[in-house]
């Protein structure tokens, strides 16, 4: 039982660290994605509205590396508590 709680504590600590990183870095990442989308929009002559570009960025943010790390750590924690 002690081994279970040790793994659980380590797993929750990794999740907490991943969430902290996401909270501090996602705003800048969102700005970066929006800048990239605007450049591609202009370069490709697509004429998307700001609302459409923000929607594209929103989709990208759902799968950004920080959120993927959180999901991975949660999955590892759940797998380790079976």
Image: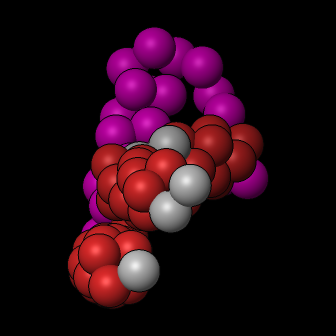
Q: Which residue is drawn at 52% across and 17% down?
A: 45
Q: Quadrant of the N terminus?
A: bottom left
- Apparent side of residue 67 relative to residue 21 in the rendered image (left or right): right
Q: Which residue is drawn at 29% across and 75% down?
A: 3
* Left or right of 69 on screen, residue 38: right
Residue 19 visible from this viewpoint: no
Q: Which residue lies furthest to the front in this view?
A: 1
Q: In this view, does 14 lie above or below 57?
A: below
Residue at image position (42%, 56%) is 80
* Front-most of residues 82 and 50: 82
Tell me which colouring the rendered structure shows: secondary structure
Q: Which part of the image, by quadrant, shows the C terminus?
A: bottom right
Compared with 34, 45 (above or below) is: above
Residue 11 occupies quadrant? bottom left
Numbered label tally: 0
Which of the two residues, 74 or 81, is positioned nearer the viewer here?
81
Q: Can residue 5 be seen in this view?
A: yes
Q: Residue furthest top?
A: 44
Q: In this view, does 25 lie above or below 53?
A: below
Report the magenta stretch's main SS: helix
Q: Does the magenta segment cover residue 41?
A: yes
Which is more toward the observer, 39 or 55?
A: 55
Q: Magenta stretch containing residue 27, yes or no?
A: no
Q: Position of residue 8 (x, y in %)?
A: 39, 77
In the picture shown, does residue 22 fall above or below 71?
below
Image spot of residue 56 (x, y percent) = 62, 40
Q: Position of residue 9 (x, y in %)?
A: 33, 85
Between 52 and 19, the one lying in front of the other is: 19
Query: Residues in magenta?
Result: 28-51
**In percent of the image, x 63 and y 28: which residue is there?**
47
């Amino acid at each position: 039982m002690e081994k279970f709680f040790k793994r659980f504590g380590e797993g929750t600590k990794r999740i907490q660290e991943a969430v902290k990183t996401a909270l501090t870095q996602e705003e800048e990442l969102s700005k970066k994605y929006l800048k990239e989308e605007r450049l591609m929009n202009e370069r490709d002559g697509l004429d998307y509205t700001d609302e459409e570009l923000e929607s594209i960025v929103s989709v990208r943010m759902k799968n950004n590396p920080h959120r993927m790390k959180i999901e991975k750590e949660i999955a590892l924690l759940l797998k380790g508590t079976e």
